[in-house]
């Protein structure tokens, strides 16, 4: 899947392909119309076909743990069981994403290319906060264009100077919030309460992984679909690493 | 499909006291009924004693606050002075009306003390920039109905900064406790002619 | 392809000069003299209304223009170019300011906006520089709070009303600027532009004193004009604009609180002749 995308043209900030095209205003709610009479989506507020994959992020003392489910789905069908929904943007920043099939990879590559371009031009890296705000501004710009990206994201990073971990939650409307732990999709409903109870800002990686296991166990127990396990990566001051994660644990149902 | 103003939730209120004003907001960011963050401030500073509060769609809260940060910084560079609350209010109004047929889904509130006259100033707006000047208080957000009630009941003229803090805090906390979409802590700024006090309220975390 | 030939006419000479701008200055320096004097409580702009023929109807000729209620300007150089700039100045004071902030621009901001228009004509394709220099006079209310009434007692023991406002956005008060065809602008206490600018400036240097009041400034303006004027001096041949106290009688209504008349106004023929008889 990813290889096909690679053949598509990379859209750098300077390329004029998408954003400079016709600037016809999108159909929006007028302030008076509070009812939902209009069937056409106002400001793309209803994501078209956002597929709920599992996205999880947990910060600890000196790391950000990120997990994304490995299933690629189309309707009820699993197309791929080893899908990678993560992107390393620079040495200390990792983005995980889910959403409408084409948009996710397109948007991720666009962001990836521009963050890389910044690193190349300036011989320095954008800090996590800067990365988050750049991604937000791009997604917010797309939101008011004719065809917006429907992508939900988590951005994890470690500031190379302060060595402090940062995690940002962002939805397809480009609402951005810094959070200690986050989830997207159905995982939110199953995992956030677990994290509320057990998370502390100064946990070690080991404790973080234990927390993550508690979350994935709960997903296995409650989520009616098989998301084919999660791909787990960790961001520390030394960069991004893939972690071995036991996805084959048997969880007894409640 | 609910109104874009009610997706993320949030509340904001501003009040006038004697030679001072106060502005306060809650800290919740949600997606419908699910709370995503309890650390999403909706108040933004645009000068030594000038604040803008933004409630509504979270993405537009960020976009609009970024836009005014840019506009007010340009104003400050060009004119070598800080923007007055009244001037900011007119800038907000004209900027929002510019997007009349594709508006930002926000309900802004401006609060400040005018440096030249020393007089307190508050006003609110609808999402397309119609200004609502008020001598007493301005409310906005998903808890605006509740806020109207609490403010109407608690506000009185010529309050001291301390009384004003007590009043606005009680008004906000009581209002958001009756609104499922706002709450989870609050921020309060008490603005006097040459002093601004920021206070964080814990509030109910449920 | 048409834009191939719309390169800027103002191009550098090998010595680094922009001769087109120098030619524009020549046009200014052969224009009718105009002058401006800043006082503590106002500004005067004055110029000669020169008509090439006795058949011209003098009242229809106007060289001093109102831009905003508190800002006005006068020129030396090419009349048609000036009219274009007056139009643009009035327009930009609304599109670039009043329609955004619901208040009129401070003098310096307006001067910068006009100067930008003038500068762009020195660098754009297919246009020539403006053949005028401008004197722009305006009053700013000021941002700093009034620190009580500053009462000064002058020599006669009479209390003199001094505002402590000396011009500028922060302090408020009168400011007088000159804008040249290059787009550069200068703040002045008193200056002159046009044919007899040099001699007028020498005269002003002798006559100008600190703490001048508007009435004295008008007097000095007329004396200076007298030195340079070629024809007769009367209410028809002289034009004067002042920045002074709010002219509430020009509002057209009264009894409305918080509304203030324009500070910039042109003197009537009768007012000018009154000043001339007292000269």
Image: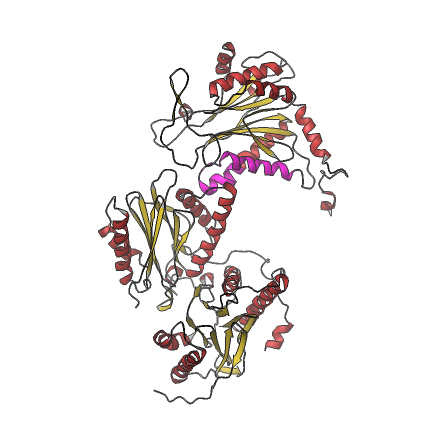
Display colour scheme = secondary structure
Residue B101 horizontal/vertical position (percent)? 46, 52
Instruction: Reply above or below: C31 against A144.
Output: above
Give the side of residue C225 with respect to residue B25, left or right.
right
Q: Which residue is drawn at 39% across and 51% down?
A: B52
The one nearer the camera, C55 or C87, is C87
Instruction: Reply above or below: C168 against B130.
Output: above
Asked whether residue C114 is drawn in magenta, I would say yes
Q: In which quarter of the image is the N terminus of chain A?
A: bottom right
Quadrant of residue A107 within the rendered picture:
bottom right
Q: Can residue C57 be seen in this view?
A: no
Please identify the dominant SS of the magenta region.
helix
Residue A42 horizontal/vertical position (percent)? 45, 61
Give the side of residue A20 with respect to residue B153, left or right.
right
Question: Of all residues shown, which one is farthest toward the top?
Answer: C277
Residue B53 horizontal/vertical position (percent)? 38, 53
Q: What's drawn in magenta, residue-wise?
A: C92-121
């Amino acid at each position: 899947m990813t290889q096909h995308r690679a053949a598509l043209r990379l859209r750098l900030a300077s390329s004029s392909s998408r954003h400079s095209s016709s600037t016809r205003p999108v159909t929006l709610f007028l302030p008076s119309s509070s009812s939902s009479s209009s069937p056409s989506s106002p400001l793309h507020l209803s994501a078209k076909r956002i597929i709920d994959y599992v996205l999880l992020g947990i910060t600890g003392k000196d790391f950000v743990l990120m997990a994304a489910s490995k299933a690629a789905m189309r309707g009820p069908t699993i197309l791929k069981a080893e899908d990678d929904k993560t992107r390393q943007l620079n040495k200390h920043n990792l983005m995980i994403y889910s959403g409408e099939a084409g948009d996710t990879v397109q948007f991720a590559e666009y962001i990836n290319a521009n963050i890389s371009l910044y690193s190349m031009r300036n011989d320095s890296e954008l800090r996590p906060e800067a990365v988050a705000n750049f991604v937000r501004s791009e997604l917010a710009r797309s939101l008011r264009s004719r065809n917006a990206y429907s992508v939900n994201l988590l951005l994890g990073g470690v500031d190379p100077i302060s060595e402090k971990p940062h995690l940002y939650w962002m939805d397809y409307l480009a609402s951005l919030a810094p959070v200690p732990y986050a989830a997207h999709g159905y995982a939110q409903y199953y995992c956030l309460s677990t994290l509320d109870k057990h998370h502390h800002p100064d946990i070690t990686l080991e404790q973080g992984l234990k927390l993550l296991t508690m979350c994935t166990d709960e997903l296995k127990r409650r989520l009616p679909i098989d998301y084919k396990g999660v791909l787990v990566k960790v961001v520390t001051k030394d960069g991004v690493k893939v972690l071995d994660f036991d996805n084959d644990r048997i969880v007894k149902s409640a | 499909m609910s109104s874009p103003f009610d997706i993320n939730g949030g509340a904001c209120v501003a009040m006038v006291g004697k030679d001072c004003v106060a502005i306060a907001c809650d800290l919740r960011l949600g997606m419908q009924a699910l709370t995503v963050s309890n650390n999403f401030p909706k108040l933004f500073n645009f000068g030594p004693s000038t604040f803008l509060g933004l409630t509504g769609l979270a993405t537009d809260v960020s976009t609009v606050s970024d836009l005014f940060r840019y506009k007010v910084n340009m104003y400050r560079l060009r004119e070598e002075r800080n923007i007055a609350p009244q001037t900011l209010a007119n800038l907000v109004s004209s900027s929002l009306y510019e997007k009349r047929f594709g508006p930002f889904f926000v309900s802004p509130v401006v609060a400040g003390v005018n440096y030249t006259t020393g007089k307190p100033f508050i006003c609110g707006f609808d999402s397309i920039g119609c200004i609502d000047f008020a001598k007493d208080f301005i409310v906005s957000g998903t808890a605006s109905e509740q806020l109207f009630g609490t403010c109407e009941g608690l506000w009185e003229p010529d309050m001291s900064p301390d009384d004003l803090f007590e009043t606005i805090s009680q008004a906000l906390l009581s209002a958001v406790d009756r609104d499922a979409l706002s709450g989870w802590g609050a921020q309060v700024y008490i603005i006097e002619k040459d002093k601004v006090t920021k206070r964080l309220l814990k509030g109910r975390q449920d | 392809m048409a834009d191939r030939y719309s390169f800027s006419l103002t191009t550098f000479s090998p010595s680094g000069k922009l001769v087109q701008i120098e030619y524009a200055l020549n046009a200014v320096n052969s224009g009718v003299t105009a002058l401006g004097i800043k006082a503590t409580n106002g500004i005067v702009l004055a110029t000669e209304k020169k008509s090439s023929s006795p058949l011209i109807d003098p009242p229809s000729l106007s060289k001093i223009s109102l831009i905003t209620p508190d800002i006005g300007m006068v020129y030396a150089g090419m009349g048609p170019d000036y009219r274009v700039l007056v139009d643009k100045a009035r327009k930009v004071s609304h599109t670039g300011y009043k329609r955004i902030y619901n208040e009129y621009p401070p003098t310096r901001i307006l001067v910068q906006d006009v100067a930008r228009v003038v500068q762009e004509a020195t660098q754009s394709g297919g246009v020539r520089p403006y053949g005028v220099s401008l004197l722009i006079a305006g009053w700013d209310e000021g941002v700093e709070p009034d620190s009580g009434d500053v009462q000064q007692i002058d020599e006669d023991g009479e209390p003199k009303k001094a505002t402590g406002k000396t011009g500028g956005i922060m302090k408020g008060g009168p400011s007088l600027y000159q804008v040249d065809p290059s787009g550069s602008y200068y703040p002045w206490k008193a200056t002159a532009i046009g044919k007899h600018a040099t001699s007028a400036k020498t005269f002003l240097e002798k006559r100008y004193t600190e703490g001048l009041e508007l009435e004295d400034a008008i007097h000095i303006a007329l004396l200076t004009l007298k030195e340079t004027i070629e024809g007769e001096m009367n209410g028809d041949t002289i034009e004067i604009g002042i920045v002074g106290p709010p002219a509430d009688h020009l509002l057209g209504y009264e009894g409305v609180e918080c509304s203030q008349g324009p500070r910039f106004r042109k003197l009537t023929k009768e007012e000018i002749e009154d000043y001339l008889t007292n000269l």
